[in-house]
Amino acid sequence: MANQAKPRPLLLKKKPLEFVKPSKHTPYGNLSLSTLDNEPINEPMYAYIYVYKPNEKKQNDPVSLLRKALSDLLLYYYPISGKLMRRRSDGKFQLVCIGEGVPFVVATADHDLCSLNYVENFADELAMQLVHELDVNFQSDNGCHPLTLQVTKFSCGGFTIGLAVTHVLCDGYGVATIFNALTELASGKSKLSVVPVWQRERLVEKLDGEPAKVPGADYEGLMATSPYMPSGDMVTETVNIMAENISRLKDTVVLEERFTTFEILCAYIWKATSRALKLNLDGITVLIITVGIRNVPDPPLPEGYYGNAYIDVYVEILARELEESSISDIVKLVKRAKKSVLDKRYVEEELRNSERLMKADAKFEGVADGVFLLTDLRNTGLFGSMDFGWNKPVNIWPLTPQEYERNFGIIMRPSKLDPSMEGGAKVVMTLPREAMVNLKKEMAKRAGSGIKLIKPRL
């Protein structure tokens, strides 16, 4: 069989960087952030690429619409037109609101989106070209911009919107709130359906003199190891789990109480990942899941709150127990861990401990081979309408910075490109290359035709 020709490299022409400023005067001053916003793990920039097909009936230029909408958006979300800086007094972040504007880049590509499969399973090295640079330097006296926007127009008439943001500013729900507001204004609406709320002080706890409790410190030296780690060759690939396969998985679970799709996927993917990593069975493996806490405070956080509002929850078990446990048993563990976060006192203690950890600069220093992070973005609002004349985006592709790479998975709704995936889930997985090969075999063996494992495009 003849070798297939490699696709042409993606070549972009970028116009000079501009700064979109608020359309009217906005407040000046410094804004403090929450305890969760200040956690070191939230410092990197990450991004979402929204992919829009061409619309032959639409005569407007998406760039001019988005530029004006962004300028109007900054009247509501004026903090993101400022700069993120560290306070000299305590090293905490603050947003210096000076109305400098949001970095805005316009680019044109020599491809059509169809030839790039609408950025589905796109190699990160290429996808990085569709967002403004993700490098940030929080140590600089000049600070950094918390959010940037890049619009890339393709030869077919379609385009992508690359939204890059530091996690210090917001979580996935917050990104969705900002982007939905942007597309509302771009569609011609004069008011936002959800008004943004700052209120970061509601998720702040003070130091209490107690020693910091480092997650995982109790079992340091007991963690499971993998022959594939540490690895300098981490790869990201997509696991598409069809709706029929999720239903079959649910049919295997026997529980007296209700369980969610997320819980069943956690159990299934964690077990398969442990096998793929070939963890030693006498070591401890840890699943980290992110659980939203917007409804835990009294009163609950308002709908327009766009700061970080989630807690990391740890589920620990011997790799041998994970291997021998049924999916039902693992679902019980995940459900029990999630329930703990719904206690207001638990959340307050977690925030206090975060303050202790930051003050002591304490963190887990042990082996992390068996640690697996799984987060669910399906219900954060990232998949709302976002139609401002070009219909809904046909795809949303997440990007995480290279220095953040670890064993992790992001559960998303599938793109609209494959009708057979309706009702299913797209899991963007990052693992060592050899472990990823094992994962494909493991999941294919256990799920048959209900699983599609897809390599990224070169």
Image (tube, rainbow, N blue to C red):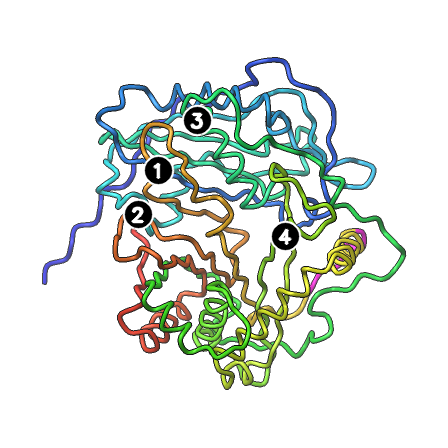
> Which of disc 2 and disc 1 is earlier in sequence?
1
Q: Residue at x 40, y 21 (%)?
A: 65
Q: Residues within 10 Å of mark 3 (few under 14, many from 20)?
A: many
Residue 175 within the magenta-colored segment of the rendering: no
Residue under label 2, please give it: 416
**Nearer mark to the viewer, of 1 and 3:** 1
Q: Residues within 10 Å of mark 1 (few under 14, many from 20)?
A: some
Name the side, left or right, on which 238 lies relative to 38.
left
Q: Amino acid at mark 1?
A: Lys
Residue under label 3, please give it: 105
Q: Quadrant of residue 152?
A: top left
Q: Is residue 72 above or below residue 52?
A: above
> Which of disc 4 and disc 1 is earlier in sequence?
4
Assign a secondary structure to mark 4. strand
Q: Which residues are magenta?
A: 359-364
Residue 352 seen in render: yes
Residue under label 1, please give it: 392
